[in-house]
Each structure stands twice: as C-alpha cells, then as structure tokens.
Amino acid sequence: MGAVPASRYIFGSIPWYSFLIVSGAVIAVILASREERRAGFRKDTVIDLALWILPGGIIGARLYYVAFSWDQFRDDPVSILKVWEGGIAIYGAVIAGFLIILLFSRRRKIPALKLCDIIAPGLILAQAIGRWGNYFNSEAYGLEITNPSLQFFPFGVLIPEAEGTAWHMATFFYESAWNLCVFVFLMIARRRWFRKPGDVFLFYVFLYSCGRLVIEDYRMDSLYATSSVRISQLLSVVFCAVILILYMRRRITEGRGSRIGCVPAAASLLYTLPVIAFTLNLFIPPAGMTVGARTLFLLGYSLLSIVSLMVLYGRSGKDEVYYAIRTDEKPAV
C-alpha cells in the first residue's frame, strides 16, 4: 500500500470502498453479538437489530451527505443512489442508528442505553476500517503538503489533479488511527471503569467528536452548515458540550467527591467553564489567526474537553463497574 491506491476495486467490479464498509459492519455485529449475553440480552438481539440498523444507517449517512452537498446531486438525482462511489457521512449514520435503536428498544421493551453500549466499540472500529475506503476512492484528504520532508505515506497521499498529482494530508488515516485508539480505550474501560448504562456510548460520541473536531479543520471536502462553519465541527462541539453538562449534572446529583480531592460535587461546574468558553469562541476565532494557531486552538479545546470529562467522571470501585459481570449469568431482558 502506497501513496496512490493501485485500484479502486478489490476484484472485478467490487470496489474497495463497499468491501471495507461491509467488512466493518460485519465485525461490529460480531463484537456486539459476543457482548449481548454479558449485557443481559437474549440471543440474536443484535442480529435482529442489525437487520434494522445497517440499512437505516446507510440511508441516514447518505441523506445527511446529500442534504449538505445538494449542488453535487441537483442535476443528476439518480446519482444519489450510487453509494458505492462514496459520499456518506458518519454523523448521519449515528443519528439514524440511534433513532432506530430507540424504536427497536421500545418495541422489544429492552433498555436502549445498554443496547447502545454494546454496539459502540464495534461501531468505532468499523469507522476505523471504513475510513480506508476513502483512501481507495482518493477522497477525504486534507490540505496540500508543500514541505518535501512531509511528503510521505501515510502522513500524506498523492491525489490526481488537473496537472498531475499533488501531496495532500491523509486526513482519512488520521481519523482511522484516532478511531482505533478510541476502540481500544472503550474495550478496556467498559470492564474497569464505566459505572452506568450509556457510559460506553456517551464516551464513544465524546471522544470521536473531539478527534473529528481537529481533523475536520484540514479536510478539503467538508460539508458546511453555513459558508464558514463546517457541520461536523459544529456537531462535535455541541455533542462535547452536552455530554459534559450531562456528567456535570450526574456528579452534582450523586454528590461524589472529586477525583483530585474532597471537593464538593457542585464545584465540578468549574471544570466545564473553560470548555464552554472555548465553545463560544470556537467559530469566532481571533482575527488573523494562522493555520498553526487554529490547530493549537482546536487541540486545546479537545484536550481540555477530554480532561474535563475524565475529572468529572471520577474513580470507580470494582463493585461499581457495570459491565464487569459473569458471562454465564442468565439474560435479564
């Protein structure tokens, strides 16, 4: 594998993009199926859900992409159906998938948050795998790299242009690597740290958003909410802020001490104030901010958000870890 993909097709007329998306989805289903008994669900709950969520997620991801890039499809609406050529947005898939889980859980009378928890690790791994489809489609790349010392794969990729090829930042690879790190964290933390249903899923959304916020700033093909605001960054900021507030409220309600000392739970609000300040200024950066300064600004926001969440969440005793249960227990739901 080099700076330029050998072919868009794995064999015959089957594109790598479709193969990787499907492979990631299959792996996600397998991982969630292995977890369903531990989480207390009946056998084949995940398989039944997959029949709903896989097509629904693809439709949601496509509609989301089309909605924010309508000019690309206006003259040829039939091309909306050509998903194998690329053009789906993971946020659309996650939003559609979450709504489907709510409907599925209500119909089956099972806890939706627990279902989200067993799906989240496989989902982020599927995203890590699926991002390589962008490599084979020569899409989701970043700014042009003019420094010869940085013109190497996988930091950069060669993208065909009118006058030949040019090196661009391999933003698809950056996101794939980040997603893989989030997957490893979730797999470890759910057995050693998370205390309540929904924690795995909320941390998945939060950590993915933190990474996407920074990486999206370099992409050349971003979808825009306005002429200057990238929709993925806007959603990332909203998700981070909302999740921080949710955990702040839980902390205050529980009255737990701080991870760094015996600080009253109400003081946890102070952890989120700098993050909220960053949020308010994120899309109104100081005039004349350079690319490097903006990168530091976004990295600072993401790191501060992550630290704030970790501090807010606090320690967990062995007896509090929600998913550290015996695998031979009978399903409860």
Image (cartoon, rainbow, N blue to C red):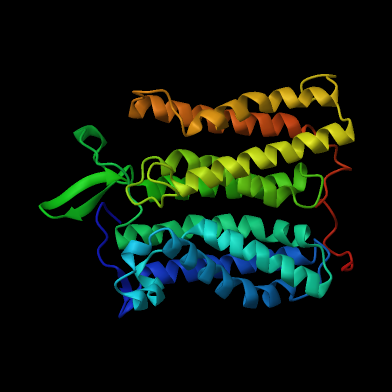
**Which residue: 72% across, 22% down?**
270
Looking at the image, is 318 positioned above or below residue 262?
below
* Image quadrant assignment for residue 43: bottom right
**Which residue: 29% across, 42% down?**
143
Q: Where in the figure is residue 242, as x and y percent of width and height?
A: 67, 41
Looking at the image, is 166 positioned above or below residue 260?
below
Q: Nearer the viewer, residue 160 or 87?
A: 87
Please give left or right for residue 277 compared with residue 40 in the image.
Answer: left
Q: In which quadrant will I find the C terminus?
A: bottom right
Q: Where in the figure is residue 42, as x and y percent of width and height?
A: 81, 73
**Which residue: 79% across, 75% down?**
107
Looking at the image, is 247 positioned above or below residue 99?
above
Q: Residue furthest left?
A: 163
Please give left or right for residue 220 compared with residue 21 in the image.
Answer: left
Q: Where in the figure is residue 32, as x and y percent of width and height?
A: 68, 64
Q: In which quadrant will I find the N terminus?
A: bottom left
Q: Where in the figure is residue 41, as x and y percent of width and height?
A: 81, 68
* Image quadrant assignment for residue 120: bottom right
* Image quadrant assignment for residue 209: top right
Q: Nearer the viewer, residue 2 or 120?
A: 120
Picture mark count: 0
Please give left or right for residue 238 compared with residue 296 in the image.
Answer: right
**Which residue: 70% across, 25% down?**
271
Residue 213 seen by the camera: yes
Please give left or right for residue 204 compared with residue 285 in the image.
Answer: right
Residue 88 seen by the camera: no
